[in-house]
Amino acid sequence: MKIYLKIWRQDNPASPGQMKDYQLDDVSQDMSFLEMMDLLNESLIQKSERVVEFDHDCREGICGQCGMMINGRAHGPLTHTTTCQLHMRSFKDGDTIYIEPFRAAAFPIVRDLKVDRKAFDKIIQAGGFISASTGETPEANGILIAHAIAEAAFDAAACIGCGACVATCKNSSADLFTSAKITQLALLPQGQIERTERVIAMVDQMDAEGFGHCSNTEACEVECPQEISVLHIARMNYEYNKAQLVQH
Amino acid sequence: MLESKIPEGNLADKWDNYKEHVKLVNPANRKKLDVIVVGTGLAGASCAASLGELGYNVKSFCFQDSPRRAHSVAAQGGVNAAKNYKNDGDSVFRMFSDTIKGGDFRSREANVYRLAECSANLIDQAVAQGVPFAREYGGYLNNRSFGGVQVSRTFYARGQTGQQLLLGAYQALMRQVGANKVKTYTRHEMLDLVVIDGKAKGIITRDLVTGEIERHAANAVVLASGGYGKVYYLSTLAMGCNTSAIWRAHKKGAYMSGVSWIQFHPTCLPQSGEHQSKLTLMSESLRNDGRIWVPKKARDERKPNDIPEDERDYYLERRYPTFGNLAPRDISSRAAKERIDAGCGVGVMKNAVFLDFSKAIKEQGKEKIKEKYSNLFKMYDKINAVNAYNEPMLISPAAHFTMGGLWVDYELMTTIPGLFALGEANFADHGANRLGANSLLQASVDGYFIAPYSIPNYLAGELKAEKITTDHPAFAEAEQVVKKQLQQFLNINGHLSADHFHKTLGKLLYDGCGLSRTKDSLEKAIVSIKTLRDQFYKELKITGDHTINSELEKAGRVADYLDLGILMCEDALSREESCGAHFREEYQTPDGEALRNDHDYCYVSAWEWKGADAQHELHKEPLVFENVSLTVRSYK
Ligand SMILES: Cc1cc2nc3c(=O)[nH]c(=O)nc-3n(C[C@H](O)[C@H](O)[C@H](O)COP(=O)(O)OP(=O)(O)OC[C@H]3O[C@@H](n4cnc5c(N)ncnc54)[C@H](O)[C@@H]3O)c2cc1C
Ligand code: SF4
Ligand code: FES
């Protein structure tokens, strides 16, 4: 099928960017979206033009490295699907597709569709862990964890750190990402000791990185490829308020 | 000259003996010692975090935009440990012997025993970090069993075990970054190793954003850069997986072992067209309930549901009545290839076999199957737009895991003093075939439990050594070589992309040095790859410049893959036997099984680089088996 593309091109964080037009005449329904991008780049090489830079690695929806705004939606038209798992059968012959980077003040554009998501690492560095150095560990079955708790912790832990929640939020809030980690560690018995400091440090870091505040529109949950629930945000607020009380 | 440094004593005492005698570094001195760790997968992240906790200065490198994205993240099935929680007869010795046998007696006893011995600790470590493994209703950890063994020793976190283990290691790493013990360099690619007076003293990297070529000095260098299965282009690996880190170390003197031992995973989604960039793995657990078959008749064009029962060939059940659909990976993959080559393959490219759930659905009900595999059925539907509850899945074998890698001794040190290799990047532990769920384990055990002993044992000797800085001429020289190569790629200005060469190489290797090989196929592949390599240096085309440029990154990786591909074929050619994943058609039993030759080939091959135009030199490390007897691996 024939596909028209309008793609954001920007050389570096400081330079102005613009949408550029491209056309592909021979796209197959079975191609993944990123394979369509490969095809485009192959054609650009043949025309001696610089390729479109975009992030990707695993191409199976788990590493969290891919991510584009496709026709205005983070990761494209399907819900709960990463860009790499989107296929061209979601589009029709003759369609025009708008492709832009994930935009947020805390995610500066590196080039074209690549953005810098280091701010997420910084939030984890602030407290998104349990301090268990290598060797300092009791026998694994020494602390029992109820099936339901382990499953709920898993649901929160499934976040792939892609940033779609931030990109889709009109305030560029990182609440969904941060709250998922806070929930996972707050649910587990191993995470109790650091629970208070953790939530304060992570939330403060999130603010320091320049993410916006959550205004409960819940758009993030719809786009999140891992179906992370906005209920975690409520829990994070609860944990944060409680921690403030405990600390003062 | 190859000294594996296996400690004295009984098998079960070796690791303790080793630990009791390693040299220690005084805590006050540790901050004077720098360690570079390339890779942030399970092996690299756990090593960097653990060394940071001990007080060393660590620099950690990865090419992705965050350490959390290393390809360990993609592992689905699980991780093995000899906890014997199920009281089903598991033990360290049984896990050891399963692994040795699974590897077709081509790995070192002492290494494998240590892997089994440290396995229980890994589960303790991960649970303490908050890894949400599956639990039973009573709150205890749950287990399942995985291909090729008879006990339940696999721990799992739904279908995302690798992700959860990696996030545990990543968070431990982030904690050390926050504590200023580890510095991370993301979007950095290692492009050379710096060797001074025979010892590893640093690396040259390229900042993938600015394009800057950087020098980093250290007292020891750790390569935990993962597997090179992407050499086949179509594989279950991530797009950026490469051999460059280990290959460039190889060119600086580190030997490579088991180079052609590549595991092909039997349950992957088949290639559907030329555009395809990767073959997605469908968890092997599907084989617990799915039956594998092809039509009896070659080139049967009927829809699967229209083919009557007696015209179907359930070839695994037919050939391996005891293990049936659960036969080990190498055997299942080869059996599929045998049928596909016979013309019975299915799908648009006739390159697949059916994985059929209709019997399981009939017997257990659709709900039960949904409960077990709904995420996999969903994924299948997403990729293929096919509902596998109603018709069989199409699967086919794909390049998946590299048993080969840098040769290391018991301390995980390569033939270059001060250079260590961990995880999938080394050759150790899995022999000629890896058992499912053993490699997350190996990567983790290498990083959490072995490197924190063996690296300090080396570093203790570094305290008195002269401190090397990046002003040393060896750094300037290595930097020049890297810069020259990048410029060369940009200058060629031919007309074919790096992907073109990568795809072509992949096809040559699938045919010549894939699931099965012959003297003839290997010799032909060597000639073709050499021709392709010449063409690469004449006709490559890269647009853009030195700054951020994914095509330039690819070119470097493909250049190394081309060299590696030739060595793979030479390695396979030199081993005139079949063992594990290495199936030489000339060496098989009358019923088509691998025919090992312990008399002549019970050794580890270790290849030494002799220069771009010279032949590699083969060194041999004999394998000695004192605790298991060499039997014929049979899953009939
Ligand atoms: C789809 C899939 C499913 C799997 N499932 C299982 C399973 O269920 N159980 C199991 O036990 N095993 C499984 N495996 C195998 C297992 O996941 C891997 O063997 C293991 O995770 C490898 O870990 P690693 O740390 O050695 O390497 P990786 O996790 O691959 O990490 C490599 C690291 O090196 C870095 N790197 C590479 N090259 C360079 C360079 N030149 N410069 C800088 N950095 C570099 C990368 O950025 C990355 O951080 C699976 C593998 C795949 C592909
Ligand atoms: S919460 Fe969802 S959308 Fe946000 S980073 Fe995690 S996986 Fe991506
Ligand atoms: S490329 Fe890994 S999630 Fe898309």
Image: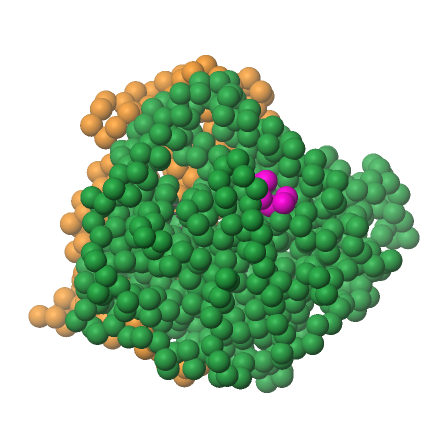
State the residue lying farthest toward the left. Answer: A248
Query: In front here: B387 or B51?
Result: B51
Query: In front here: B398 or B418?
Result: B418
- The residue shown at (31%, 75%) is B23
Picture quarter containing residue B461?
bottom left
Q: Which residues are magenta?
A: B565-570
Chain A pictured colour: orange
- The residue shown at (77%, 60%) is B595
Residue A244 horizontal/vertical position (percent) = 14, 66
Chain B pictured colour: green
| Drawn side of residue A5 relative to residue A108, left or right | right
Report the number of discs. 0
| Drawn side of residue B173 relative to residue B165, left or right | left
Is residue A20 in view?
Answer: yes
- Quarter placement of the C terminus of chain A: bottom left
Residue A75 horizontal/vertical position (percent) = 42, 38
Say whether residue A104 is magenta.
no
Magenta residues: mostly which secondary structure? helix
State the residue lying farthest toward the top. Answer: A47
| Drawn side of residue B44 relative to residue A3, left or right | left
Picture quarter containing residue B291?
bottom right
Query: In front here: B17 or B355?
Result: B17
